[in-house]
Amino acid sequence: MADNQDDLPGQRTGFLARLSATETIIVAIIAMIALAGLMLIGKGFYVKAKTELFAAEKQLTSNS
């Protein structure tokens, strides 16, 4: 009855450990492309915010 409860569950292997070398390389390339895309989005937000601040500062100085 309780014999099965004392057994340790099979050791779970990690996601990358189950993939072949080629599949691991493909996953790494996809992850790098996704990271580069996120960095470009972040840079776009930074440039947009910087431009808006510059425009607001220019407008304040021209009104004075």
Image (cartoon, rainbow, N blue to C red):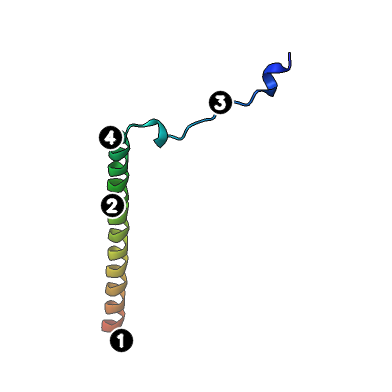
Question: Residue 9 location in percent, x, y?
Answer: 60, 26
Q: Which residue is mark 3?
A: 10
Q: Which residue is mark 1?
A: 64
Q: Is 36 placed above or below 12 here?
A: below
Using the rendered view, name the quadrant where residue 52 is placed.
Answer: bottom left
Question: Residue 5 location in percent, x, y?
Answer: 69, 21
The 10 Å Cα crowd at callout 1, few under 14, some 14 to 19, many 20 or more, is: few
Amino acid type, label 2: Ala
Looking at marks 2 and 1 on the same chain, the residue that comes earlier in the sequence is marked by 2
> Which secondary structure, mark 4?
helix
Amino acid type, label 4: Thr
Alpha-carbon span between mark 2 and mark 3: 37 Å
Amino acid type, label 1: Ser
Q: Which mark is residue 36?
A: 2
Q: Nearer the viewer, mark 2 or mark 1?
A: 2
Q: Residue at x 27, y 43 (%)?
A: 29
Q: Residue at x 29, y 83 (%)?
A: 61
Q: Are marks 2 and 3 in contact (CB under 8 Å)?
A: no
Alpha-carbon span between mark 1 and mark 3: 74 Å
Amino acid type, label 3: Gly
Looking at marks 3 and 4 on the same chain, the residue that comes earlier in the sequence is marked by 3
Point out the residue furthest to the top here. Answer: 1
Q: Which residue is mark 4?
A: 22
Alpha-carbon span between mark 3 and mark 4: 26 Å
Alpha-carbon span between mark 1 and mark 4: 63 Å
Question: Residue 54 location in percent, x, y?
Answer: 28, 74
Looking at marks 1 and 3 on the same chain, the residue that comes earlier in the sequence is marked by 3
